[in-house]
């Protein structure tokens, strides 16, 4: 009974994880909403806690034993000490730091529970792609309607293209709403879609039957459309690089007739079909949107120039934070609070933005000491990806690229939960000696 409840609970958690439904208290800086400063309790937390508790009661865990992993525990302990030192007795700094630590701790426990229970990688991938499908349908409807209909029970705020602050593509005299799905920003939706797209390609390539390969090809085509209409350039680059690496890896294995990883027998024919289907559908959708897509590569356009300027400004502010707090940082997600204090004003004409490079933001938040701990954890993850065969490296490289172009993998729950899913997929072992694992 416990095993059945656990199996249901972790699957429900993954399905709910992309949704942003929560209870929260408002917070603001310089007259603008401060997302990182809001205390929040997400609905998915309840399922995560239930999964962890049930996972502890599962009698036959996998091979992952936390007691044999002292290095990660020491690294996390060092990060915690750095946070305590950086925050000191400043209550205002502790508020975002505690929220960040609560989110990261819950996700780390969730990942540990999945890996400890021996959940197959393919099963995690199947449910991760399934979790994205409602957002694809919702996003297409939003794009056709050109508005996001708010729904508090789904954690969705109303977004209209004519409103200031809404993510749009501005072309000539009109504004085109970017696809949000159920996410707080199109860039975050784009990151999830990029990871989901690569997962669906891998699922198609390793499908046991033609019908399953067709299903995953349709899923990859749907995610490609969603990825396109988010207009998230960083996600475009990450998915393109990941696709090239995945195709190159499988082609090289087939040409060299190399023995394939146990449980990951691939079909080059299925992979090519999935890639071709996604490209054809994406091109068919892109042709009518060609002028909107081209706008994303024209820095002279008003909104694009403003975006570039904001990113450069946030990058400069990030470097300033690192120079002023080089060793222990300023505390997780306290960067905007520090910036507002430096401005010395209660209002601003524009909202403050953190550095859009996730690695720079992490450096500013935890300093050089914390960055050493993070580097060690990253090295362990890369080592696991190299040990757990080709696809783990592909999906991890996608996440690494996403963090180059935006801060949400470090700073926001929606990005942190995406990181957690990727880490779980990297750390889990391939299914033993079967072409298609259970789902």
Image (cartoon, rainbow, N blue to C red):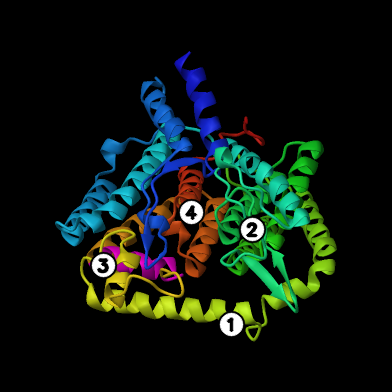
Rendered residue at 14%/56% (across/down): 89
State whether residue 21 appears in this view. yes
Dot in front, 1 or 4: 1
Majority secondary structure in the magenta region: helix
Rendered residue at 54%/40% (across/down): 430
Residue 362 on the magenta segment: yes
The residue that disc 2 covers is 246
Q: Is residue 126 above or below residue 201?
A: above
Q: Which residues are magenta?
A: 355-368
Give residue 415's mark. Answer: 4
Q: Is residue 323 above or below residue 434?
A: below
Q: Position of residue 158 (x, y in %)?
A: 61, 52
The residue that disc 3 covers is 367
Disc on the earlier residue, 2 or 1: 2
Name the residue nearer the viewer: 436 or 148.
148
Q: Is residue 348 left or right of residue 302?
A: left
- Where disc 2 sits, the SS reads helix
Q: Position of residue 153 (x, y in %)?
A: 56, 37
- Neighbourhood count class around disc 2 (C-alpha, 10 Å): few under 14, some 14–19, many 20 upward: many
- Neighbourhood count class around disc 4 (C-alpha, 10 Å): few under 14, some 14–19, many 20 upward: many
Q: Position of residue 12 (x, y in %)?
A: 55, 31
Measure how far apart labels 4 and 2 are at the Cα level: 23 Å
The residue that disc 1 covers is 305
Measure how far apart labels 2 and 1 are at the Cα level: 34 Å
Dot in front, 4 or 2: 4
Disc on the earlier residue, 2 or 3: 2
Residue 178 on the magenta segment: no
Q: Position of residue 415 (x, y in %)?
A: 48, 54
- Neighbourhood count class around disc 3 (C-alpha, 10 Å): few under 14, some 14–19, many 20 upward: many
Measure how far apart labels 1 and 4 are at the Cα level: 25 Å
């Amino acid at each position: 009974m416990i095993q059945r409840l656990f199996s249901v609970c972790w699957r429900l958690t993954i399905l709910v994880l992309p949704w942003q439904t929560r209870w929260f208290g408002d917070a603001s800086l310089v007259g603008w909403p401060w997302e990182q400063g809001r205390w929040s309790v997400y609905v998915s937390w309840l399922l995560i806690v239930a999964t962890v508790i049930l996972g502890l009661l599962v009698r036959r865990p996998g091979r992952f034993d936390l007691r044999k992993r002292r290095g990660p525990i020491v690294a996390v302990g060092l990060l915690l000490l750095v946070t305590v030192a950086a925050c000191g007795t400043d209550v205002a700094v502790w508020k975002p730091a505690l929220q960040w630590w609560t989110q990261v701790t819950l996700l780390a426990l969730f990942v540990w529970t999945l890996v400890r229970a021996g959940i197959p990688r393919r099963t995690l991938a199947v449910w991760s792609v399934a979790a994205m499908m409602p957002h694809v349908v919702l996003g297409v409807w939003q794009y056709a309607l050109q508005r996001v209909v708010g729904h508090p029970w789904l954690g969705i705020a109303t977004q209209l293209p004519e409103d200031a602050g809404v993510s749009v593509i501005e072309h000539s005299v009109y504004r085109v709403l970017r696809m949000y799905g159920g996410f707080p920003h199109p860039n975050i939706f784009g990151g999830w879609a990029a990871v989901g797209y690569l997962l669906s390609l891998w699922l198609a390539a390793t499908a046991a039957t033609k019908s399953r390969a067709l299903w995953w090809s349709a899923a990859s085509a749907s995610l490609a459309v969603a990825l396109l209409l988010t207009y998230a350039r960083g996600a475009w680059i990450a998915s393109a690089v990941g696709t090239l690496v995945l195709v190159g890896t499988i082609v090289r294995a087939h040409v060299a007739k190399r023995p394939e990883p146990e449980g990951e027998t691939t079909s080059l024919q299925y992979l090519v079909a999935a890639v071709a289907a996604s490209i054809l559908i994406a091109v068919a959708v892109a042709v009518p949107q060609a002028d909107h897509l081209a706008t994303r590569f024209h820095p002279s356009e008003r909104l694009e120039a403003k975006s570039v300027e904001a990113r450069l400004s946030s990058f400069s502010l990030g470097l300033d934070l690192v120079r002023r707090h080089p060793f222990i940082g300023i505390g997780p997600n306290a960067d905007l609070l520090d910036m507002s204090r430096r401005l010395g004003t209660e209002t601003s004409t524009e909202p403050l933005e953190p550095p859009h490079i996730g690695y720079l933001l992490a450096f500013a938040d935890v300093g050089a000491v914390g960055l050493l701990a993070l580097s060690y954890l990253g090295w362990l993850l890369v080592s696991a990806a190299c040990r757990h065969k080709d696809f783990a490296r592909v999906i991890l490289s996608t996440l690494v690229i996403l963090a180059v172009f935006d801060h949400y993998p470090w700073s926001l729950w929606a990005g942190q939960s995406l990181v957690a899913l990727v880490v779980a997929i990297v750390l889990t072992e391939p299914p033993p000696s079967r072409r298609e694992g259970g789902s």
